[in-house]
Amino acid sequence: MQKQLKKYFLFFTIPTLLAFAIAFVIPFLLGIFLSFTQFTTVTNAIWVGFANYAYVFTDPDFLQALWFTAAFAVVSVITINLIAFLFALMLTRGIRGTNVFRTIFFMPNLIGGIVLGYIWQLILNGILYRFDATLTVSPVYGFWGLVILMNWQLIGYMMVIYIAGLQNVPRDLIEAAGIDGANRLQTLRNVTLPLVMPSVTICLFLTISNSFKLFDQNLALTAGAPSKKTTMLALDIYNTFYGKSGWEGVGQAKAVVFFLMVGLIVLAQLLITRRREVES
Amino acid sequence: MAKAARAEGNHPVVFTVLVILAALFISPILIVFMNSFKGRFYISDTPFELPNSETFVGLTNYTSGVAKTGFFQAFGLSLFITVGSVAVIVLFTAMTAYYITRVKNGLTSALYYMFTFSMIVPFQMVMFTMTKTANVLNLDNPVGIIFIYLGFGSGLSVFLYSGFVKSIPLEIEEAVMIDGYNPIQSFFKVILPLLKPIAITVAILNVMWIWNDYLLPLLVIGSEYKTVPIAIQYLKGGYGSIDMGAMMAMLVLAIVPIIIFYLLCQRYIIEGVVAGAVKG
């Protein structure tokens, strides 16, 4: 079978491979190369070694964005997962209307980032207006605005994954824990939680990578105002590429650093949480 | 036990909490809807008040918003790009995943790892170089971008399909081969129908992403062709204040189709998200 199929390599793979090469592989490799050059149009690249990288780590905009993004990621990853898990616990108790609640909580996830940004701009400015302020008065408002927005968007998604995990926990294990005299909290910590670790792994992966890559929401809600203080990494890289001509090499170096950082964080998280998964 | 389960199912406190949370979750959408009927100057000041005889403007915001953004063209373009991209992704990545899963050699496993790897690479890493590549190859138009989406979206899709193909017993294909089918016939007549559940997942995850995508279409096909998120972002313009009335109306027009789509395909969407998460 395999031998026969083997001859059809081109038929089965060529459209995807061609597109994958053009949209990903070539741009990725070219991106690494260009991060060591100074260029404006790719064809006029001049090799500059690590100069772009040296600049990246002394660029106040990048460092500010890095700090803001990291703080945002920590806060929103914790809040989203905690709240989503609580929602999932409430919705796996056989309460009437469970499906309606699930439908409502999940809905914001289908709305695009740009639209989400403007929805929350309206609401948060409406509230802040009563205190004679707006979202762009202080970066603190922008920060918490983004946290709230991101929670609204992702809680439903993570909840659905946690519900799937909770439904896979065998009922008799919970009952056995109860018979052994464990209270609800002990059962949750020692029986349920270890068994839903695969869901935790996925939800952490999704929330961490989404928090770091956040762009549309950031652009629509504050666009970095006031004075770039709420600019996140993805937006800072965009601004470096398309905001100042001649800085494309630095933008590309920032992108490489960004990729390495996201990749390492996500890999570390996967390794750590995977180790805590147990078989039921 | 049955008694305990029933008592849990009617838990009035949890039910009340869920009702309040659901109301909170839905309110941002209702607030935007309410404001879309108010005069533009009343929206920023009093966003939480119902329209009254003074502030109500009927459908003015909708007509001016549609005219300003070219909303229906944008909607048509978004629909064309999303349907086209998802169709090619669903078909071509299924073929690729089938081949690289069934034929085991160095090349196919290298490809598998490359596709998986591409999933963690942030868009910013290839943003500039992909745009340039698309320009050079004349892919910077509404048809060409479909090819770009196939390439950039293939990582997740190949990964999901591969996991599923592994679970299909080889015997089925061997049996149809004995009946005289060649691999192409066997794939289209036997395998493809079996892939339907995961194909729906692949389609849904890609629809959610591509329909809402802002940056890739902006950079690749630019201002000449506007998708819905781009049209909305353009309302903000470069100078002065946003026409809040038109903005609210366009947000409603952007959200309503998604909610209808979601309510129609709700079961598939939630199942698709779970299936995607379990594999991811």
Image: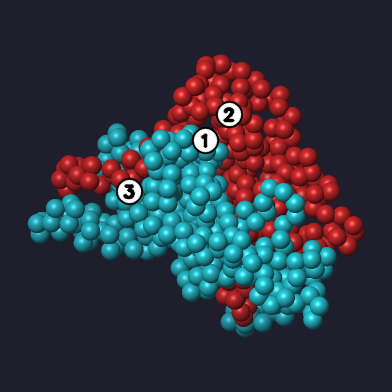
Amino acid type assigned to the residue bearing label 2 in the image: Glu
Which residue does the numbered mark 1 point to in the structure image?
A: B128
- 3 or 1: tag closer to the N-terminus: 3
Residue in view at x 79 percent, y 80 percent: B52
Residue bearing mark 2: A248
Neighbours of disc 2 within 10 Å: few (<14), some (14-19), many (20+): many
Q: Is residue B107 left or right of residue A160?
A: left
Residue wearing tag 3: B97
Which of B162/B217 is in front? Answer: B217
Q: Chain of mark 3?
A: B
Q: Are marks 1 and 2 on the same chain?
A: no
Say if labels 2 and 3 share a chain.
no
Q: Position of residue B71 (x, y in %)?
A: 55, 63
Image chain in cyan: B
Q: Is residue B98 rendered to the left or right of residue A40?
A: left
Residue B269 image offset from top left, x and y in percent: 49, 66
